[in-house]
Image: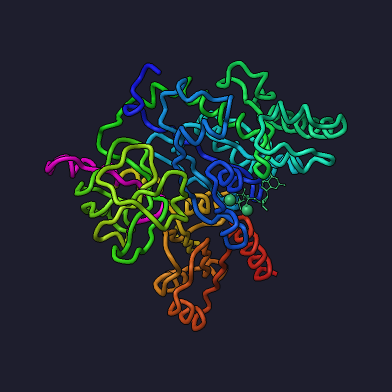
Amino acid sequence: GTLDAGSLRTPIVAVLGHVDHGKTTLLDRIRGSAVQEGEAGAITQHIGATAVPLSTISEMAGALVDPTDFDLPGLLFIDTPGHHSFSTLRSRGGALADIAVLVVDVNDGFQPQTEEAINILKRTGTPFVVAANKVDTTPGWNPQEGQPIQQSLEQQSERATSRLNENLYELIGDLSDEGFSADFYWRVQDFQSNIGVVPLSAMTGEGIPDLLTVLMGLSQRYMKEEMSVDVTGPGVGTVLEVKDEQGFGATLDVVLYDGVVREGDTVVVGGRDEPIVTEVRALLQPRPNAEIRAEKQFERVEEVRAAAGVKIAAPDLDDAMSGAPIRVVRGDDEAALETVTQEVREELAKIEVDTAEDGVVVKADTLGSLEAMANALDEAEIPILRAEVGDVAPRDVTVAQTAKEDVHKVILGFNVDVLPDAEEAIEHTDVRLFDDDVIYQLVEEYEAYVEELER
Ligand code: GTP
Ligand code: NA
Ligand code: MG
């Protein structure tokens, strides 16, 4: 390589796709873990992050990747839940991810969340490849553990090959309906103007060497310029989750996408009412190939460089919000602190939901899901009186009671808990609570209720 790998930012790769199409299983295969098996109901509920070093990638990709060809330190994979919007994946500039893998089950083809993912990729202009997953479920398939897909295809019967091709051509057709020219990845010359389709199996590993090769090639070719900026500047990131950790209190799981964060740094984080200004007490880094959501043995470090997943311990984080920005303020500069705080405030204001004089109360678990809820309600022409991140609390009941029309005396809770005293308050009022962890179901439940009331 020509550039010093230490000066390049690790590319961020988002893994997107419809529920159960195999995103987590694909990452499990790459990092050698079993996160998917530990998930309640086999459903990913939160966005996760895993740093996969170049050595792991080249080992998996075998002859397809020569590590000396690459200057990149590895890839930071972001796992996303298929069952609701992942618009939490934002950054100052738009998309948090540099590139994306759109996972599609070859048998199921395009599904609602596949479309939603495509729309977000279009809107943010994120380059992506398609992982045509579960090729091993093709009738008559002869599995070839961990092999490159061309080698595996040579071992398949004509019948299996033609069944698979039928599905793959349907997928290529669906992509073309969305305005993308797509083809089998080995026929693609320019991955920026064409979408490469990589047939693979997250279960048997065949085709994964190909996917990793394409991802490394894409990052190296097209992102090097972006990767070599701002690697030592003040850190910038997005909060994935706010979690209590024993001995630390509330901590933040963060994707750092630019710059550096150090122990002792002053940081500004988006809070429920105002930006929170605090000082980093400890930086806890997951081990290589460990999913930050599942990690139990964090390593305490003095400094973390982008891109990385890191747990940040600091005082006063109780009101921090999932999906909010976090920024490092370097130095003892009052003016810098004021500027950064103002920027965080402005960023949060942009996410704020339009509210009306009368409408429903909305609670959601993250800023991203709150935004997704607001979009869905806007489409359904349901007005919002108040929208906030957090569990359903007694004061939400009080606010819902002030709604003018009966159909609006309602709380819609997405992926949140209902505090016990809120439950009690609801029982003693005419306020109705709907909660669900699927946005469109929540909206449908409410619409059915409105119809019933109007009958
Ligand atoms: P959500 O996070 O809930 O959106 O799902 P996901 O996309 O992460 O899918 P997940 O990894 O949970 O896989 C769903 C199911 O498909 C699991 O039972 C997996 O074992 C299975 N699966 C995933 N990939 C493959 C594959 O390549 N072949 C076969 N046969 N099964 C697969
Ligand atoms: Na799943
Ligand atoms: Mg998953």
> Vertical placement of 17 versus 169: above or below?
below
Q: Residue at x 37, y 55 (%)?
A: 321
Residue pictured at 41% horizontal, 75% vertical: 394
- Image spot of residue 37 (x, y percent): 60, 57
Q: Position of residue 39 (x, y in %)?
A: 57, 59
Is residue 38 visible in this depiction of the protein? yes
Residue 298 lies in the magenta-colored region: no
Question: Which contiguous range is marked in magenta?
Answer: 320-344
Give the total number of marks visible in the rendering. Answer: 0
Left or right of residue 15, residue 131 in this image: right
Task: State the residue in front, 406 or 182.
Answer: 182
**62 and 408: which is toward the camera:** 62
Q: Residue at x 69, y 30 (%)?
A: 149
Q: Which of the image's four quarters has the C terminus?
A: bottom right
Quadrant for residue 120, please give it: top right
Query: Would you place residue 380 above or below residue 169 in this image?
Result: below
Please identify the residue farthest to the right as the structure is shown: 159
- Picture coordinates of residue 155 (x, y %)? 79, 30
Colour scheme used in the picture? rainbow
Q: Nearer the viewer, residue 283 or 314?
A: 283
**Quadrant (top left, top right, bottom left, bottom right) of the N terminus:** top left
Quarter location, residue 246? bottom left
Does the image show residue 95?
A: no
Q: Quadrant of residue 141?
A: top right
Lateral position of residue 123 relative to residue 237, left or right: right
Q: Is residue 188 above or below residue 422?
A: above
Locate residue 228, reporting x and y percent. Answer: 35, 25
